């Protein structure tokens, strides 16, 4: 990075920083791989990230008092008007880059930075104009650009910071530096550039004339004008070449000269830096899923509105009357404040192995707040807190309430009266977010920064009970309370109030029970499996080495590339920045295209390695009670589906022998007689039939025959008995593909058929089931008009990219618009079913309990003698979860382990 500058120039001049937005964005784009910087919706952000990082560092190091960024409007400028070939050789802008300049503009707007884009002129012309004006007004000027034409602007008070390594390192070009590098003054640089030509701008060079010759001529003759005047004095073939290209040189010189009098609406004095809109900035980073805390901190650290060397106020304008409660003081505090809504922040010590609640902070709207340590409560305090915490008529606002619900029973407490969960509310308002951290939500919705002691996930590290930690936790509690108020109105705006109260909050409480229940693990069985998979991995390694004739590292993409494409000469796969891809699809393609055994062995090696890691992870997650307690999340999938982590049970394969062997490691626990699984048959397709109202598809479901065989007979125009296994396979893949927004190309890849055949298959399907075709078209059109999709229960998914100019982003949004209503409705139905089943079990006084929800499947642990009653109850309640035109169908299975209970 450029050498750090002092905050004041030696002669106390104001300092203007000017940046070439397009030039730097393009460099950032190529400096960072797009595949590592892409949002969940498919929007690349590498140029935005690289630009923001470079910007933060430059503002920090140069400390400008004034700042502006200039952008190109288009390739049509006064230069292209005079010389149509100007920049005509440049390749088409990559699709991944498109749209990122606009996003950088949004970033700058959030920073209240000035930006220019003038029709007919390049960013360099705008910069030249501002730099000339600023120097004349007594400014020191710094120009950050990747265009060397800017070197002509360098003076004693104007410096160019030129990127020499991506956008991470800037070299300072002063008059002395230009002289050192080119042997010329900055004023002579455009003469030199005209002689040299510029391939990037399509400005012709003079044959046989390089940079050394160009610089020698300028020094010898003093200027290009004098050189042209005395061109006959240049001897030899280079002289002939010069004289033959004088017109080109003269044109180059004209085009290289930067315009210094572009008409602008602002002067350098108007470009003084202003405090950020921190809420907008944090929201911008969140929407783009840029969650690197270092970048955010660097950007905020150079906010002109921030007070230097002063931490942000803990409550940002909210006065708290906070008290650290000693033993015996909690009960009186609750007696005074417990009837009003309270924000609750706590330290969950489950992950630390102590299994409970450590510190707690409560905050009321009138500013009263309290902090206490649960380990220091006396008997009266503990009883008062437990009573208040469980009371349904004592309103509470929490962030991630499930965490409290999961650990409270460790103290003999229950959590009731939760009227708002700010994490779930934020999810319903913006389901496309990837993070629901409390501190980020506080900045975005309250314009408030939490105390520095708060960790990134909104929780504190357990341990210290000093005043700073107490203040931080009380600040969080107040932020949670205020966020609850903010989200109340926003939930109404998006029609999600009932979703939160009737579905998400009750589901959260149920998931807390499931997490506490866990499922018994057969450790010896899993250990044996891990050993089998480890042995299979080693066997695959031996076979791979034997297939090649020498040892190599199977885990090294570089070595594998050398072996496959160098030594063995196998057909080249897709080219990447690091060579030819060796991912699973590429290996499968190579296995199909060649008879060499290495691709097959490599696929087996990777699969066995993945299975070993899966089982190894399961073994590590077996708790002291012998059970595995996964953690469920309601806020990961934008469609509303649940997910699980630690371990991720959705990663356990279902349809392979190895996957079923792993599932046999999940067994019935002591005191229970069996496991029961229950799920919906083809729920996505039934939802699609219901939403599309297609009579043919509904009839296929209600006929009682095999759906895919029935549909295949209609699509292929044959009797049901004539439907082959291959026909059924294609129809099944396509039917589910439609529910997931699969394209004809995607279907062709999945079925390994030509795209034309896949398109024909889909066209024939739509001819037979026109209602489905019309519904899918309507779903995209309505989402494009409203900006969002909606499930039967009103769950929205916002898709602004439906109107994007970027084809890649637009097509991805269209696929989401196709599948979100179907997937989201299915997810809603499963949640309703879970709630109904759990409530019915409780009302019936049964001991059997729910353990897991994975994909569309519910897993229960059945108490002795209760199987028949539970099976009848489960089928009844799941069938009643909603009413569809294609009735819900529930499959149930029972067995001693998860695999045996399959159906």
Image (tube, grey):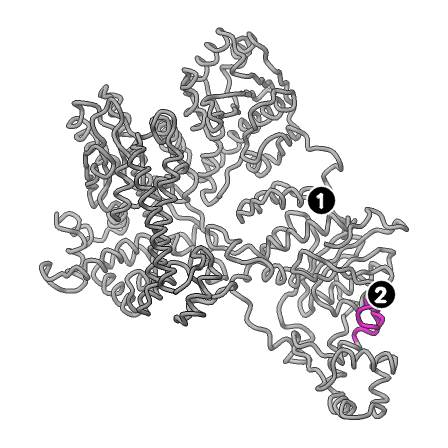
Q: Place residue 592 in its image quadrant.
A: bottom left
- How crowded is the residue under tag 1: few (<14 C-alpha within 10 Å), some, or many (20+)? many
Q: Is residue 354 above or below residue 386?
A: below
Residue 31 magenta-highlighted = no
Q: Mark 1 vs mark 2: which is more N-terminal? A: 2
Q: Answer whether residue 420 is visible to the viewer in this image.
A: no
Q: Is residue 619 above or below residue 280?
A: above
Q: Residue at x 30, y 55 (%)?
A: 737
Q: Position of residue 498 (x, y in %)?
A: 38, 33
Q: Which mark is residue 312?
A: none
- Asked if residue 30 lies left or right of residue 253, the reply is left
Q: Residue at x 50, y 38 (%)?
A: 436
Q: Place residue 762 in its image quadrant.
A: bottom left
- Asked if residue 1 lies left or right of residue 692, the reply is right
Q: Position of residue 863 (x, y in %)?
A: 21, 23
- How crowded is the residue under tag 2: few (<14 C-alpha within 10 Å), some, or many (20+)? many
Q: Residue at x 85, y 88 (%)?
A: 229
Q: Position of residue 21 (x, y in %)?
A: 66, 60
**CA separation in Å, label 1 and label 2:** 29 Å
Looking at the rendered structure, the secondary structure element under dot 1 is loop
- Of residues 820 and 164, the one drawn nearer to the viewer in this rendering: 164
The residue labelled by disc 1 is 302
- Of residues 560 and 98, the one drawn nearer to the viewer in this rendering: 560
The residue labelled by disc 2 is 175
Q: Residue at x 49, y 34 (%)?
A: 489
Q: Is residue 262 above or below residue 839?
A: below
- Of residues 899 and 753, the one drawn nearer to the viewer in this rendering: 899
Instruction: Give the residues drawn in magenta, as a range.
Output: 178-190
- Asked if residue 667 lies left or right of residue 465, the reply is left
Image quadrant holding the C terminus, namely top left
* Dominant secondary structure, magenta: helix
């Amino acid at each position: 990075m450029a050498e750090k500058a002092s905050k004041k120039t030696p002669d106390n001049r104001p300092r203007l920083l000017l940046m070439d937005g397009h030039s730097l964005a393009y460099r950032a784009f190529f400096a960072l791989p797009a595949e590592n910087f892409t949002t969940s919706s498919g929007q690349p952000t590498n140029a935005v990230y690289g630009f923001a990082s470079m910007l933060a560092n430059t503002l920090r190091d140069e400390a400008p008092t004034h700042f502006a960024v200039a952008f190109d409007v288009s390739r049509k400028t006064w230069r292209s008007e005079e010389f149509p070939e100007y920049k005509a050789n440049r390749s088409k802008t990559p699709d991944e880059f498109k749209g990122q300049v606009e996003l950088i503009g949004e970033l700058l707007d959030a920073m209240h930075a000035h930006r220019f884009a003038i029709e007919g002129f390049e960013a360099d012309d705008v910069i030249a104009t501002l730099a000339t004006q600023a120097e004349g007004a007594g400014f020191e000027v710094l120009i950050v650009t990747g265009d060397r034409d800017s070197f002509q602007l360098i003076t004693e008070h104007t410096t160019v910071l030129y990127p020499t390594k991506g956008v991470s390192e800037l070299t300072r070009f002063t008059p002395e530096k230009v002289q050192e590098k080119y042997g010329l003054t900055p004023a002579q640089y455009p003469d030199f550039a005209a002689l040299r030509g510029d391939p990037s701008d399509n400005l012709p060079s003079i044959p046989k004339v390089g940079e050394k010759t160009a610089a020698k001529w300028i020094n010898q003759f003093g200027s290009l004008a004098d050189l042209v005047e005395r061109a006959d004095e240049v001897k030899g073939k280079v002289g002939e070449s010069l004289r033959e290209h004088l017109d080109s040189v003269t044109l180059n010189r004209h085009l290289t000269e930067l315009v210094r009098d572009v008409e602008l609406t602002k002067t350098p004095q108007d470009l003084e830096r202003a405090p950020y809109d921190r809420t907008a900035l944090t929201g911008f980073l969140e929407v783009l899923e840029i969650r690197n805390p270092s970048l955010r901190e660097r950007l905020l650290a150079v906010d002109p509105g921030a007070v230097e060397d002063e931490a942000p106020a803990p409550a940002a304008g909210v006065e708290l009357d906070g008290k650290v409660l000693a033993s015996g003081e909690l009960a009186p505090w609750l007696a005074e404040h417990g009837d009003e809504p309270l924000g609750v922040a706590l330290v969950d010590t489950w992950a630390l192995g102590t299994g409970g609640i450590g510190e707690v902070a409560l905050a009321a709207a009138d500013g009263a707040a309290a902090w206490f340590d649960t380990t220091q409560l006396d008997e009266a305090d503990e009883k008062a807190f437990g009573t208040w915490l469980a009371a349904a008529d004592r309103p509470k606002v929490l962030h991630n309430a499930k965490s409290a619900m999961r650990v409270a029973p460790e103290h003999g407490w229950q959590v009731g009266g939760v009227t708002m969960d700010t994490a779930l509310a934020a999810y319903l308002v913006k389901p496309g977010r990837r993070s629901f951290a409390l501190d980020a939500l506080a900045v975005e919705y309250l314009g408030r920064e939490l105390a520095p002691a708060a960790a990134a996930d909104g929780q504190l590290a357990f341990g210290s009970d000093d005043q700073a930690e107490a203040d931080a936790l009380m600040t969080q509690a107040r932020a949670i309370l205020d966020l609850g108020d903010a989200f109340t109105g926003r939930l109404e705006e998006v029609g999600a109030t009932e979703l939160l109260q009737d579905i998400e909050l009750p589901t959260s409480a149920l998931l807390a029970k499931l997490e506490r229940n866990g499922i018994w693990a057969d450790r010896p069985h899993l250990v044996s499996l891990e050993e089998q998979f480890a042995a299979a991995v080693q066997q695959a390694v031996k076979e791979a080495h034997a297939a090649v004739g020498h040892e190599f590292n199977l885990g090294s993409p570089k070595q594998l590339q050398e072996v496959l494409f160098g030594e063995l000469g196998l057909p080249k796969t897709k080219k990447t920045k690091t060579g030819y891809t060796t991912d699973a699809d590429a290996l499968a393609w190579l296995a199909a295209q060649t008879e060499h055994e290495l691709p097959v062995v490599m696929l087996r090696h990777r699969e066995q390695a993945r299975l070993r890691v899966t089982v190894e992870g399961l073994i590590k997650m077996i708790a002291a009670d012998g059970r595995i307690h996964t953690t469920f999340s309601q806020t990961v999938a934008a469609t509303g589906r649940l997910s699980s982590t630690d371990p991720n049970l959705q990663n356990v394969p279902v349809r392979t022998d190895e996957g079923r062997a792993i599932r046999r490691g999940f067994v019935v626990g002591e005191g229970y007689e069996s496991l029961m699984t229950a799920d919906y048959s083809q729920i996505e397709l039934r939802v699609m039939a219901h939403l599309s109202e297609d009579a043919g598809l509904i009839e296929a479901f209600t006929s009682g025959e095999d759906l895919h065989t029935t549909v295949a007979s209609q699509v292929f125009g044959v009797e049901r008995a004539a439907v082959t296994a291959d026909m059924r396979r294609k129809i099944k893949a396509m039917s589910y593909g439609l529910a997931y927004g699969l394209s004809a190309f995607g279907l062709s890849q999945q079925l390994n058929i030509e795209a034309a055949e896949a398109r024909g298959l889909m066209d024939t399907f739509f001819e037979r089931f026109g209602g489905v075709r019309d519904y899918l078209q309507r779903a995209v059109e309505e989402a494009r008009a409203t900006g969002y999709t909606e499930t039967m229960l009103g769950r929205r998914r916002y898709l602004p990219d439906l109107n994007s100019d970027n084809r890649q982003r637009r097509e991805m949004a269209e696929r989401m618009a196709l599948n979100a209503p179907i997937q989201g409705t299915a997810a809603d139905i499963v949640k309703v079913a879970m709630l109904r089943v759990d409530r019915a079990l409780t009302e019936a006084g049964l001991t059997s309990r729910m353990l897991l929800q994975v994909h569309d499947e519910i897993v229960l642990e059945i108490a002795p003698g209760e199987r028949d009653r539970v099976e009848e109850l489960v089928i009844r309640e799941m069938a009643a979860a909603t009413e569809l035109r294609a009735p819900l169908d529930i499959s149930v299975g029972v067995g001693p382990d998860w695999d045996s209970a399959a159906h």
